[in-house]
Image: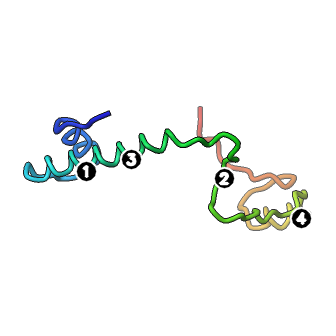
Amino acid sequence: MSVDIATVKRVARLSRIAVSEDDLERMTGELNGILGFVELLSEVDVSGVEPMTSVTPITMRKRADAVTDGDKAADIVANAPNSDQNFFLVPKVVE
């Protein structure tokens, strides 16, 4: 895939970057170089390589998945202006 000046203008407009007419030719060459490098990466044989999220082996810290109700429903609604059976009472707003 090659990039032309019209594509550079469109990308600059979409990313809201001001690019002068003098820089368009230079950026076209740079973007073509980047895309050429990406095309080279597709030639690398990655069969048998497991996908990873980091270059260093890290295991995620996990907490125990336990229900922690807390038995604090009465404390939570204690400061509410209106409550009934540990539920908040609010005025009707939809007719």
Residue that numbered label 4 is attached to: 70
Q: For the residues marked 3 and 1, what is the alpha-carbon distance in whole angstroms?
A: 11 Å
Q: Which residue lies furthest to the left in this view?
A: 22
The label nearer to you, 4 versus 3, is 3
Q: Residue 37 carries which label?
A: 3
Q: For the residues marked 4 and 1, what is the alpha-carbon distance in whole angstroms?
A: 59 Å
Pointer 4 or 1: first along the chain: 1
Q: For the residues marked 4 and 2, what is the alpha-carbon distance in whole angstroms?
A: 38 Å
Q: Residue 60 carries which label?
A: none
Q: For the residues marked 3 and 2, what is the alpha-carbon distance in whole angstroms?
A: 21 Å
Where is residue 42? Give x, y as percent: 49, 39
Where is residue 28? Give x, y as percent: 21, 45
Name the amino acid type tagged 4: Gly
Please name the residue shown 74% across and 57% down the image: 82
Where is residue 94? Give x, y as percent: 59, 35
Please name the residue shown 83% across and 67% down the image: 75
State which quarter of the image contains the N terminus: top left
Q: Residue 52 carries which label?
A: 2
Relative side of 24 to 64, left or right: left
Name the amino acid type tagged 1: Glu
Name the amino acid type tagged 2: Met
Q: Neighbour class for label 2 at 10 Å: few (<14), some, many (≥20)?
A: few
Residue that numbered label 1 is attached to: 30
The label nearer to you, 3 versus 1, is 3
The label nearer to you, 4 versus 2, is 2
Pointer 3 or 1: first along the chain: 1
Residue 79's place in the image compared with 36, above or below, is below
Please name the residue shown 83% across and 64% down the image: 63
Q: Neighbour class for label 4 at 10 Å: few (<14), some, many (≥20)?
A: few
Q: Neighbour class for label 3 at 10 Å: few (<14), some, many (≥20)?
A: few
